[in-house]
Image (tube, grey):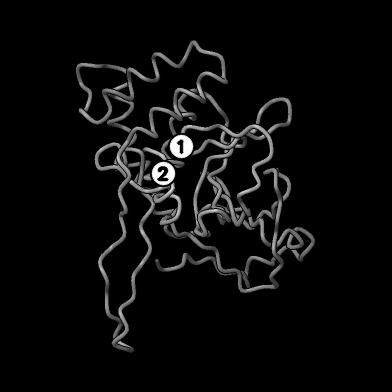
Amino acid sequence: MGGDDSQLARGRCALLIVLLTASAAGHAKYYQFDDGALLGTADMLPDWADMLSRRAAELPDFRTCLEDESRCDSRYLGVRHLLEKARPLPRQQQLALINRYVNKRRYRDDRSAELTTRLSDEPVKYRSRWSTPGEFLKRGGDCEDFATTKYFLLRELGIDSGQMRVVVTWDRRARGYHAILAVAQDNGEVWLLESDNHIYKRRHQDYRYIYAVNENAVWDHENPALDEAPADRTANTQLTEAPL
């Protein structure tokens, strides 16, 4: 995506966590995995959990492609070549290669059409659904889909799930919600893979971190004090995603 398109995409990606508990604004300049409170397993976020289920369903075709090029679905053929090229590379080059490849895909705002609720005549726009890598490679997607696809391609290269998170942020410059992929390095740094092909290795002051997910869990970065709450704190915590 070009500079203007990238800026527009970042401004239009709207994802929000609403925590029905105490609220405290977080203003971390450098993303740290241990800055957030572990809320619970990935199924706490229904749309994310649904994507993981669809991802599991598409995996057999993907695995078949990796094993036998002649049996590749067309959407996976390029990915197969990409992964073959990336496997022998050092980790830093793998990250750069995956980041560039995914960022070349078409940005697509996959919001649903306006719907009218039964309770009023006010039109309600519902947020976009999280796309699986297969869905994204077929039709493109928006910022959370770029980050999610990077996550799963890097998993194929052997990066552990515990080293990666899809992070939803508030972009102060674009004044909108935006998703990026955070990857923890062995030296303690966390690199942020962006949709403009940058990989931020140090501070990134434009973002306020809201929440993060991977295939196993959900973390809250707005309420780190929840780490000290009772063990059953998740019973009174609700995750929702804001309409666009």
| Residue occupying image coordinates x 52% and y 18% | 93
| Residue occupying image coordinates x 73% and y 62% | 226
- Categorize mark 1 by other alpha carbons within 10 Å: few (<14), some (14-19), many (20+): some
In depth, the one of 39 and 56 nearer the eye is 39
As drawn, the label of residue 6 is 2
In depth, the one of 218 and 209 nearer the eye is 209
Residue 194 position, x and y percent, is 50, 38
Q: Which residue is mark 1?
A: 196
**Where, quadrant-wise, is the N terminus in this rendering?**
top left
> Which amino acid, by three-letter code, is at mark 2?
Ser
Q: CA distance from mark 1 to mark 2?
A: 6 Å
Q: Is residue 41 above or below residue 64?
A: below
Total marks shown come to: 2
Residue 132 position, x and y percent, is 36, 43
Q: Residue furthest top?
A: 88
| Dot 1 and dot 2 residues touching (CB under 8 Å) | yes
Give the side of residue 148 with respect to residue 118, left or right: right
Q: Is residue 122 above or below residue 221?
A: below
Give the side of residue 19 with respect to residue 198, left or right: right
Residue 122 position, x and y percent, is 32, 84
As drawn, the label of residue 69 is none
Q: Secondary structure at mark 1?
A: loop
First of labels 1, 2 by sequence position:
2
> Which amino acid, by three-letter code, is at mark 1?
Asp
| Residue occupying image coordinates x 46% and y 15% | 87
Q: Secondary structure at mark 2?
A: helix
Q: Residue furthest front?
A: 4
Q: Is residue 80 above or below residue 116?
A: above
- Quarter of the figure with residue 216: top right
- Categorize mark 2 by other alpha carbons within 10 Å: few (<14), some (14-19), many (20+): some
**Where, quadrant-wise, is the C terminus in this rendering?**
bottom left
Q: Residue furthest right?
A: 228
